[in-house]
Amino acid sequence: MNNVFRKIINRFYRHKENITINEMLEILQSNKKAILVDVRSSQEYSEGHLPGSINIPVYNIEREAEKMIPNKDNIIIVYCSAGLRSRKALQILKKLEYKNLYQIEGGVENL
């Protein structure tokens, strides 16, 4: 099975909003307006985060998202430690009518 076909099959069977670290890197390299959002606490963010990310803790995302990310058409990739908070953040962002939403599958604990 060639790599392109394998990628299509893998994407079909995974939830479309879940992406791998490699897919995140591809998106960030190909779209300079894409925004990487760490939804962990400010303390966790200060202890280490992915380069280029901004911090909007999930407990503040409803209040802060529209100020920090005014363009609702931008690609937004959220992440947390294990994926639970980023899933919640995606739900909130959907309610706020953001359109191009992704989360790093399984969080960043396993990096």
Image: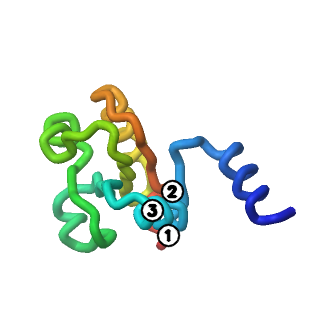
Q: Which mark is residue 106?
A: 2
Relative vertical location of residue 104 with respect to residue 101 in this rendering, above or below: below
Please give the name of the residue rendered at 28% of the width and 52% of the height, measured from the top-left corner: 39
Relative to the observer, which residue lies in front, 92 or 76? 76
Q: Earlier in the sequence, mark 2 or mark 3?
A: 3
Which amino acid lies under the numbered mark 2 shown in the image of this protein? Answer: Gly
Asked if marks 1 and 3 touch (Cβ < 8 Å), the reply is no
* Residue pictured at 76% horizontal, 65% vertical: 3
Mark closer to the chain start, 1 or 3:
3
From the viewer's perspective, tell me whether residue 47 is left or right of residue 35.
left
Amino acid carrying label 1: it is Asn
Cα–Cα span, label 2 and label 3: 23 Å
Disc number at residue 30?
A: 3
Alpha carbons under labels 2 and 1: distance apart: 8 Å
- Foreground: disc 1 or disc 3: 3
Q: Position of residue 63 (x, y in %)?
A: 14, 36
Q: Quadrant of the N terminus?
A: bottom right
Is 41 situated left or right of 92 in this image?
Answer: left
Q: Secondary structure at mark 3?
A: helix
- Residue where numbered disc 1 is placed: 110
